[in-house]
Image (spheres, grey):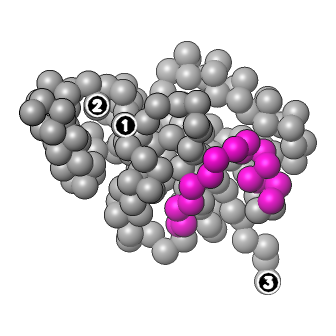
């Protein structure tokens, strides 16, 4: 039997967007298993806690049988070593993303020489999309339904409606 190829797609996913999910759909076509790793960095301020972010993703990828969603606090390279995963998936939107993502890929390779990073681009109609933009639009009461799963839309609406009270 052939070894299964497993990749990891790490990110803060605060919140998950359809751009993230587009990368997920591309990655599951390439790899036997995909682990979506919700990063939890105590130095960062998140709108949603790691449990909620993980839950949003799980609800959004339920139709895929070869995806698992995990949370992790710490270095990605350590997680990869522990789980014996060597492939990292990263989404790229613009040239500015490439510079940042390349520096992360090179650092991860310095920390663990077995790590390979594969960059995937979302569909053109999602290339401009970011979690930050979605949160800003939602904060002004804008409709974000075309950019996020329904569970995220509802959570954003609830989050911002309680802030305004």
**Quick check: is 79 in the magenta stretch?**
yes
* C-alpha distance separating marks 1 and 3: 44 Å
Q: Secondary structure at mark 1?
A: loop
In the picture provided, is 19 more to the left or to the right than 104? left
Residue with the mark numbered 1: 47
Q: Residue at x 9, y 33 (%)?
A: 165
For the N terminus, which image quadrant?
A: bottom right
Q: Residue at x 28, y 31 (%)?
A: 135
- Which numbered disc, 2 or 1, marks the residue that appears first in the sequence? 1
The quadrant holding residue 126 is top left
In the picture provided, is 154 more to the left or to the right than 27? left
How far from the left and from the top, in percent, is residue 99?
64, 18
Residue with the mark numbered 2: 135
Residue with the mark numbered 3: 1
User: Label 2 near label 3: C-beta < 8 Å?
Assistant: no
Examine the rendered structure and indicate whether residue 30 appears above or below residue 16.
below
Nearer to us in this view, 97 or 123? 97
Q: Which is more foreground, mark 3 or mark 2?
A: 2
10 Å crowding of disc 1: few (<14), some (14-19), many (20+): few
Q: Is residue 139 visible?
A: yes
- Region rendered in magenta: 67-82
Q: Total of numbered circles in the picture? A: 3
Q: Residue at x 59, y 38 (%)?
A: 41
User: Label 1 near label 2: C-beta < 8 Å?
Assistant: yes
How far from the left and from the top, in percent, is residue 38?
54, 49
- Which numbered disc, 3 or 2, marks the residue that appears first in the sequence? 3
């Amino acid at each position: 039997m052939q070894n299964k190829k497993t990749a990891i797609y790490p990110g803060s996913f605060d919140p998950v967007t359809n751009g993230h999910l587009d990368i997920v759909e591309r990655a599951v076509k390439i790899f036997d298993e995909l682990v979506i790793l919700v990063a939890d960095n105590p130095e960062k301020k998140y709108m949603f806690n790691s449990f909620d972010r993980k839950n949003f993703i799980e609800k959004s990828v339920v139709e895929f049988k070869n995806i698992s969603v995990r949370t992790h606090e710490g270095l990605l390279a350590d997680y990869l070593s522990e789980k014996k995963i060597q492939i990292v998936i990263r989404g790229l939107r613009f040239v500015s993303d490439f510079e940042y993502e390349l520096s992360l890929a090179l650092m991860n390779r310095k920390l663990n020489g077995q790590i390979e990073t594969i960059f995937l681009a979302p569909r053109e109609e999602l290339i401009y999309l970011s979690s930050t933009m979605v949160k800003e639009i939602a904060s002004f009461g804008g409709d974000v339904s075309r950019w996020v799963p329904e569970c995220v839309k509802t959570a954003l609406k609830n989050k911002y409606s309680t802030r305004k009270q």
